[in-house]
Amino acid sequence: MSAQRINERRRTGCPTPPGFHSWDCACATSSRPKAPRAVYQDQSSRRRTGGCPEGFRLPAAAVAMAAPAPGLISVFSSSQELGASLAQLVAQQAACCLAGARARFTLGLSGGSLVSMLARELPTAAAPAGPASLARWTLGFCDERLVPFEHAESTYGLYRTHLLSRLPIPDSQVITVNPELPVEEAAEDYAKKLRQEREKIVAPISDSPKPPPQRVTLTLPVLNAARTIIFVATGEGKAAVLKRILEDKEENPLPAALVQPRTGKLCWFLDEAAARLLTVPFEKHSTL
């Protein structure tokens, strides 16, 4: 993680910029051995319930334990079960938002293994709402690599191929980064699309440790304005870094540890491999 990116994400104290509404729900994960990313839900679209989103029901066989200080940690026996529960949560958040006064649902996505997870589970979970409901979804991207959409590393390109071809969401309601612009201009252009006015809400990254090096990413003020944040992590390669984030008190914490919603709820969706080193309490779930 670059110093530039860490500094951008340390800016937790300022309010969400006027004119910008953060995502109703944003999803991210990765199976690589690095800090996990997150799911974000907008405060403005839901009343405050003090827990994970109302209406979301974890499997009945869950063994509940006390929630630790870092948030409510949910561990699933497999990434397949995690994906199904995550897709159910997203679909239920959409139904709740579309029943409200705003009558729209905004979903922010990141890449990695989340693409295949949502492509496998979300169309089925969202199907009962019907095409009319999906036509009121708006999609954007919390972190996007600055490469052509046809490139194998393009987050939007992957979702366009694997997920959006199965969800009838109008192209005009998919907010994308312009990959033809230099990284600084691309970040500014994307911020304008998100109705940014005063505070910096989109940061340009020029030295990402994972190629390609240039990308644009949302900053901490946006993420910490969320009503609900759900981190998703799968795979044994995440175990050590999750232990650092959830149990260690480091002088210079990882960026994921800086995501702390001001008034919202922080949750974690992990599979057993990713959670294997944790000693903090967690909820274990199984659909078997």
Image: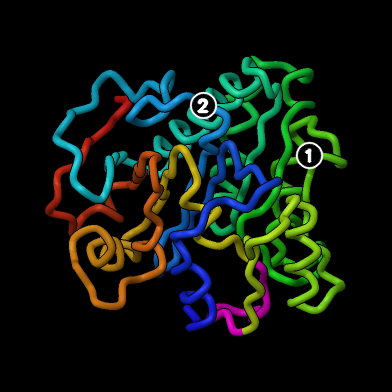
Q: Where is residue 79 in the image (x, y as percent from the top left)?
A: 41, 44
Q: Position of residue 50 (x, y in %)?
A: 33, 29
Residue extent of the magenta highlight: 207-216
Which residue matches tag 2?
46
**Which one is closest to the eye, mark 1 or mark 2?**
2
User: How far is the residue under mark 1 from the one under mark 2?
Assistant: 29 Å
Q: Is residue 97 left or right of residue 72?
A: right
Residue at 68% x, 60% y: name it.
198
Which residue matches tag 1?
165
Which element is circle 1 on?
Answer: helix
Callout 1 amino acid: Ser
Q: Where is residue 169 in the image (x, y as percent from the top left)?
A: 79, 33
- Give the main secondary structure of the magenta stretch: loop
Residue 214, magenta (yes or no): yes
The numbered mark at residue 142 is none
Task: In this rendered view, identify the residue nearer to me: 84 or 191.
Answer: 191
Residue 244, magenta (yes or no): no
172 lies above or below 53: below
Task: In this rendered view, identify the residue nearer to me: 147 or 98.
Answer: 98
Residue at 78% x, 44% y: name it.
174
207 lies above or below 159: below
Q: How many marks?
A: 2
Task: In this rendered view, identify the residue nearer to me: 204 or 200.
Answer: 200
Q: Position of residue 259 (x, y in %)?
A: 40, 57
Q: Is residue 275 left or right of residue 112?
A: left
Q: Which of marks 1 and 2 is nearer the N terminus?
A: 2
